[in-house]
Amino acid sequence: MFTSTIILTTLAAFTLALPSSISRRAGGPAAVPIPPSCTVTDPVPTATSDETYLPAPAADDALIYNAYYPSPSTNKTALSEQCLQQCYGYGNIGECKTAYWAENVPVPVGYYGSPGGQLETACLFYNRPLQAADFVVAPEGQATDVSVGVIQC
């Protein structure tokens, strides 16, 4: 009886220690470097002096991922590049077509239970290439340091 208990316990421990085919899901999408064979273009209209742009409501149907967070760094170039690389690495390669990154973007109502409206850094992914018509002029003080990339491979 004692021997069978030890054997059963040992087998159960080994079974739990076996590698799993389940992929990790915690955190944001993996940042995958975009190969040189791909091109990245910026579809945002040419801004006049103080104008910045937010995605228009018409682009909401193409939104596949959104993250809003306090800016963890002052290196905006690195943060926007990370957002673009996360877009490229999202789901099956090629699933995300456009990445939008900006600071001072209004958080939507209900985002992780928030009341919404607070301004935070945003990284948004779209499943289609956004075009100039998919953007609207942001209210003053919103959508600062905008970086948009349409990935074509």
Image: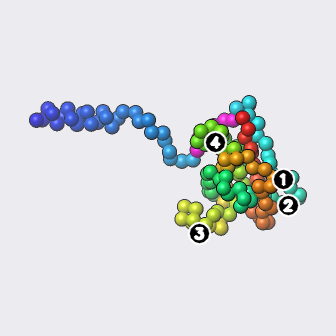
Q: Residue furthest right?
A: 48
Q: Earlier in the sequence, mark 4 or mark 1?
A: 1
Q: Earlier in the sequence, mark 1 or mark 2?
A: 1
- Specify whether 84 is left or right of 92: right
Q: Earlier in the sequence, mark 3 or mark 1?
A: 1
Q: Main secondary structure of the magenta part?
A: loop
Given this view, does label 3 or label 1 mark the residue nearer the observer?
Answer: 1
Q: CA distance from mark 2 to mark 3?
A: 28 Å
Q: CA distance from mark 1 to mark 2?
A: 13 Å
Q: Which residue is mark 4?
A: 95
Picture coordinates of residue 88 (x, y %)? 66, 40
Mark 3 element type: loop
Mark 4 element type: loop
Q: Is residue 31 magenta?
A: yes
Q: Earlier in the sequence, mark 4 or mark 3?
A: 4
Q: Earlier in the sequence, mark 2 or mark 3?
A: 2
Q: Which residue is mark 1?
A: 45
Q: Which residue is mark 2?
A: 50
Q: Considering the image in quadrants, where does the N terminus appear?
A: top left
Up-down relation of residue 39 to residue 133 (above or below) = above
Q: Is residue 121 visible?
A: no
Segment colored magenta: 29-34
Q: Are marks 4 and 3 in contact (CB under 8 Å)?
A: no
Given this view, does label 2 or label 3 mark the residue nearer the observer?
Answer: 3
For disc 2, the neighbor class at 10 Å (few under 14, some 14 to 19, many from 20) is few
Q: Amino acid at mark 4?
A: Glu
Which dot marks residue 102? Answer: none
